[in-house]
Structures are given as structure tokens and as C-alpha cells.
């Protein structure tokens, strides 16, 4: 009987202990899950309710720009500088080319002027050469008589019928001595009479050949042979 009472007491004690432990666990869980009471709110001062001053905002450090954006900006600036330098170099080359071209054009213009001047001088020289050549040819065709000796010019005006005009015309025809006239044949007389068309028949009418033979003999003491017929 006492044993049963002891067991009953133990069971009752265990039941009470279990109930007490369970109750304590419920209280701990309820305390952990329930929101804590917020502390009493202190009224804010006017300075705390007003918007922050610009100085305070400025004092807040700004976030640094990303490194990738800064690198891209620097590369763009470097590329633009390179393009500008390239354009400046091409511009300098074009300017030098223009200066060289202008110098070449001026030189060509000077050479063209010099060429025209030289061609003008050459044409003038050729004209002078042709004139002197013609003068020499005229001298050879109508060579004036020598001044001395038997070939020296005679005074053809001593022939009756030959005046200054006829003497000049005879000189132009290459006749300047008595010997030449004294050797004229009938054919020569006809030829010179045709050339002296302003004085037709004067040679035979005034007997130039006979007078020339006599004048030559009296001047040079030489008797000329009979003329050919």
C-alpha cells in the first residue's frame, strides 16, 4: 500500500513537472515571437524636422565614376587628337604641294616668255641673215669694178651719149670699163640695148664700141684686138 502511494506520488510529481515545463516553453516561444514594445518616441526638434542644409548634402561623398567609362572617354579624346593631327599633317602637305605647283607654273611662264623672246630674236637674226645674203648675192651678180689696174672703173661719161644716168645703169649691169664696151659684139649690143630700153638705139647711134676702144688706147696705151661680130 505504501509502495502504491509512493508510485502515485512520483507519477503525480512527474505530471506536474511536465505540465510546468510545457507551460514555460509556451511562454518562451510567445515571448520570442511577439514584437517588442518600441521605446517611447521623443518629440523631434525643429532643426531635425527641417530639410538638411546644402553643406550637409555637399559633405556626403559622391560615388566615383566607373573605371570603364573613364577609360572610354580617354580613348575617344586620344582618337580625336590623332585625327586632328592627321588632318593637320595632310593640310601641311597640301600647302607645300600648292607652293611647289605655283613655283613650277611661274617657272613655266618664265620659260615660255624666254622661248617667245628667243624665237623673236631668231626670226630677226634669220631676216638679217637673209638680207645680208641677198646683199652678197647682189654684189656677186653686179660686182662693182676694181678701183685700180686695168679692171679699175673708167669714166664712162667720156663716151659721147653716156651721161650720169646711163653710167649708173651700166654700173648696175656690171659694165664699168672701156675694155668691156670695146669687146661688145653685135649680139651684146642687142642685149644691152634691150636692157637700156629707155634709150633705144643709143649704143649704135653714138658708136659706143668705137669710142670705148679709142678711150682705152689713149688711157692705157693698149690697142685692143678687133671685136667679134
Image: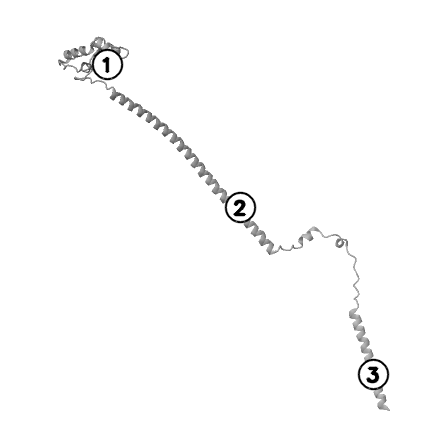
Query: How far apart in space, not on screen, are marks 1 and 2 (Cα)?
Result: 101 Å
Give 21 or 65, whichever is nearer the viewer.
65
Above or below, 107 against 164 in this view is below
Residue at position x 46%, y 40% in the image: 97
Q: Position of residue 162 (x, y in %)?
A: 23, 10
Question: Which residue is nearer to you in this view: 82 or 120?
Answer: 120
Query: Is residue 161 depicted above or below 29 in this figure?
Result: above
**Pointer 2 residue:** 84
Q: Which residue is pictured at 36% across the width and 29% down the height? A: 119
Give me the disc on residue 113: none
Q: Which labelled disc corresponds to residue 13? A: 3
Q: Is there a contact, CB below 8 Å, between mark 1 and mark 3?
A: no
Q: Mark 1 or mark 2: which comes first in sequence?
A: 2
Q: Nearer the viewer, residue 162 or 145?
A: 162
- Horizontal side of 44 relative to 57 (left or right) equals right
Q: Which mark is residue 190?
A: 1
Residue 30 image-quadrant placement:
bottom right
Q: Quadrant of residue 9?
A: bottom right
Q: Residues within 10 Å of mark 2 (few under 14, many from 20)?
A: few
Amino acid at each position: 500500500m505504501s509502495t502504491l502511494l509512493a508510485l502515485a506520488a512520483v507519477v503525480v510529481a512527474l505530471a506536474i513537472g511536465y505540465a510546468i515545463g510545457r507551460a514555460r516553453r509556451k511562454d518562451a516561444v510567445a515571448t520570442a515571437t511577439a514584437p517588442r514594445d518600441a521605446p517611447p518616441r521623443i518629440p523631434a526638434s525643429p532643426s531635425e524636422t527641417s530639410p538638411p542644409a546644402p553643406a550637409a548634402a555637399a559633405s556626403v561623398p559622391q560615388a566615383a565614376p566607373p573605371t570603364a567609362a573613364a577609360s572610354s572617354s580617354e580613348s575617344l579624346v586620344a582618337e580625336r587628337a590623332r585625327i586632328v593631327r592627321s588632318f593637320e599633317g595632310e593640310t601641311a602637305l597640301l600647302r607645300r604641294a600648292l607652293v611647289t605647283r605655283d613655283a613650277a607654273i611661274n617657272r613655266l611662264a618664265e620659260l615660255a616668255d624666254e622661248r617667245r623672246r628667243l624665237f623673236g630674236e631668231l626670226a630677226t637674226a634669220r631676216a638679217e641673215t637673209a638680207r645680208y645674203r641677198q646683199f652678197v648675192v647682189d654684189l656677186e651678180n653686179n660686182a662693182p669694178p676694181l678701183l685700180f689696174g686695168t679692171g679699175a672703173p673708167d669714166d664712162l661719161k667720156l663716151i659721147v651719149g653716156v651721161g650720169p644716168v646711163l653710167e649708173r645703169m651700166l654700173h648696175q649691169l656690171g659694165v664699168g670699163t672701156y675694155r668691156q664696151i670695146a669687146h661688145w659684139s653685135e649680139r651684146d649690143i642687142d642685149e644691152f640695148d634691150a636692157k637700156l630700153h629707155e634709150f633705144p638705139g643709143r649704143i649704135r647711134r653714138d658708136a659706143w664700141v668705137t669710142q670705148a676702144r679709142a678711150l682705152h688706147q689713149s688711157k692705157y696705151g693698149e690697142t685692143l684686138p678687133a671685136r667679134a661680130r
